Image: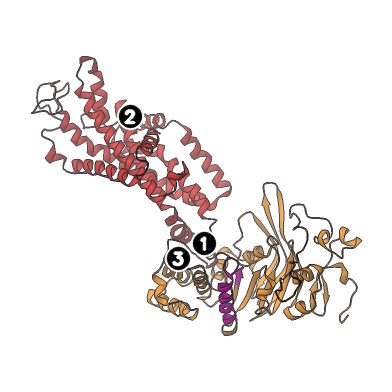
Amino acid sequence: MNLLEVRNLEIEYLTRDGNLKAVEGVSFSLGFHETLGLVGESGCGKSTIGLSLLRILPINARMKGRILYKEKDVVNLPDEEMRSVRGKEISMIFQDPMTSLDPIMRIKNQFFETFRAHFPKMEEDEMFKISSNVLKSIGIDPSRLENYPFEFSGGMRQRVMIALAIVLNPSLLIADEPTTSLDVVVQLQIMEVLKELKEKKDMSMILITHDLGLVAEIVDKVGIMYAGNLVEFGDVNSIYEKPLHPYTQLLLVSIPNVKLEDMELKYIKGNLPSLKSPPAGCKFHPRCPFAMDICTREDPPTFELNGRKVKCWLYKGEKDGS
Amino acid sequence: MISKEIRKGLRGLFKDSSGLMAVIGFLILAFYVVVAIFAPFISPYNPTQPSGPSLLPPTISHIMGTDNLGYDIFSRLVWGTRMAFAIALIATAIAAVVGIPVGLLVGYIGGKIDRVVTMIMDSIYAFPGLILAIAIAAMLGPGLLNIAFSIAVVYIPTYYRVIRSQVSTVKSELYVDGARAIGARTSIIIGSYVFPNVLPSTIVIFSMNLADSIMTEAGLSFLGLGIAPPTPDWGYDLAKGQQFILNNDWWMVLFPGLAIITIVLGFSMFAEGLDEYFNPNIGEKR
C-alpha cells in the first residue's frame, strides 16, 4: 500500500470567461517516508495539486479523479472526516510566511487551535508543553509562544509555520514553495530544517517548488509539471543524470551555474500556454525544440521507461532498457 | 446619511489631528453620559409636570424657559438624554447583532446566497433611511422598542455591507487557508480567525451609526412617530417648539436643537477619530 495514490486527477476552475483546466490527468504515487518534489513554472498547477490533497481548493474549483490517502478517497470523503484528516494526517506549509499566520493571534493560540480542532478535550498545559517542544526542536525559543507574528522575521515565521504543521505528527507534509519569499541564506536554513524533519520523523513530504536545484538534495522522487500535466516522473538521480522530457532538459540547463565561464543565462523561450484555450496536441510543442508533426496534433500518452514516466512522443515505441 | 457629511467636514477641519478630534468627541459624549446617569440630580423639576407659567423665556429659575404647558425645558432635555442614548444604543445593538453575523456568514460562504442576501440588503440600503424608519414605525406604533427596531432595520445593511466586503478580502488571506489546513472547523475559522480581523471596522461603524440613529430617532419623534408624550424626548420637544416659533418663543426650538446637534457632533467626531486611528492611511488616500 502506498501512502498516497493520485489517479487521473483533473481540476478545473470555473471562471466567468470559461473553464480553466489547471490539472489534467495527473497520476503519481508516494510511499511511506518518501519525499517528492513537484517542479514547474508558476501557473502549471502544482500548488493546485497541493491544495487538492487537503481538499481546500477555492469554491470555484471542480475535482475529478481519485486521490487515495491510506486507501481513503479524499475526493469523496465526507466533510467532517476530511476535516479530521487536515492538520492531523496531512498538513501544509504555505508560500508566504508573512501572511500565512493570523496577524492578530498569538503564536500560542494558533497552536492551540490546531490541537482543539482535533482533540477538543486536551488541557492547555499539555498543548503548551507539546507546542514548546516542537518549537524548540525547530530552533525557536518556546518563550516566543506568547508573541504575535509581527514580532518574528520571515525565516522565523516559516519555522513557526513548519512547527504548526508538524505539531500533530502528520504522515504527510505538503510544503508549497516554502522558501520562495525568503532570502537565500534563510532559504537554506529552512531547507535544512525540512531535511532534518525528513531524517528524524516518520513522515512523507511533498515539496512544491519552481527551483529544481533547491530540492534536489532532499527529494527522492521528482515530478515535472507543465501546463497542468505531469510531463515526467521518476527518481531524482535518474532525472538529473538523464532528463527525458525536452522540458526537463531545458529546465536543467537553465539553472544558472556560476562556475562556467559562459555566464549567459539560459532560459526557455516562450510562455506557458493559456489554460483556457490550450494548444492542440502536446501543450509544450510551441516551445519544444524537438517538436514533430504528431506533437501538434495529438496529446502524447504517458510512456513508461525504466520505471520512469514521461509524457512525450519522442519515447513512443521505446522499450525498457533503451 | 447626514453624519457622513458631518464627518467629511470634520476631516477637513482636523486634518492633522485626528487624535484631538477623537478626544473632543469623547469629551462631548462623556458629558452627555454623565448627564444621562445623573439626570435625577441635575434636573431641577419633574420633566412631566408643569413647574411654572407656560411659555416663560429663560430666567434664573428656568434657565432654558418653559414650554406651552409650563414644563421646564432644561429638565426635559436632561431626562431626554436618557431616551436618546437608550434608543440609539438599542437600535444600533440590534442592527449590529443582526448585520454582523449575517455579513460574516454570507461573506465567508459566498456564491449564490451572497448574491441574494446582498441584493436584499442593497435594496434596504438604497431606500431613504428616514422614510423606511417612518414606514416601519407607523406600522409598529409608538414605544421605545418599536422605535429602536424600526431604526435598527435601517442600519442593518451598513453593518452587513462593511463586514461582508471585509470578510471577502480576509477569507482569501493565506492564514485563513492555513486555518483550514490545520483542520479548524468552519465556525472556528469564522469566529476566531475572520471576525477578530474585521472587528476594528465594526467599532467605527458602531459609533457612526449611533450618531445616525439619534438623528433618525429625533426625526421620528419630530413627526410624532416616536415615544408617546409626555415622556421627555428631544425630537418631540423640537416639534412642539416649532409650533410656537412664529410667536417668537425661540427657546423652545433652540435648546432641543442644540442638544441634538452637539450629541451627533460628539458621536461623529469620536467615530471619525477612531476611524483614522484604526486605518492610519485614510487621510492619505483622500
Q: Residues within 10 Å of mark 3 (few under 14, many from 20)?
A: many
What residue is disc 2 on?
A: B219
The x and y percentages for residue A310 are: 80, 71
Give the magenta range.
A174-198
Q: Is residue B72 left or right of residue B223?
A: left
Label 2 with label 3: CB-CB less than 8 Å: no
- Please, which chain is the residue tagged with disc 3 on? A
- On residue A99, the disc is 1
Outermost residue, bottom side:
A200
Amino acid type of the residue that numbered disc 2 sits on in the rendered structure: Gly
Does residue A269 appear in this view? yes
- Please, which chain is the residue tagged with disc 2 on? B
What residue is disc 3 on?
A: A149
Give the spatial CA distance, label 2 vs label 1.
Answer: 46 Å
> Under tag 1, what secondary structure?
loop
The x and y percentages for residue B184 are: 50, 65
Q: Nearer the viewer, residue B274 or A308?
A: B274
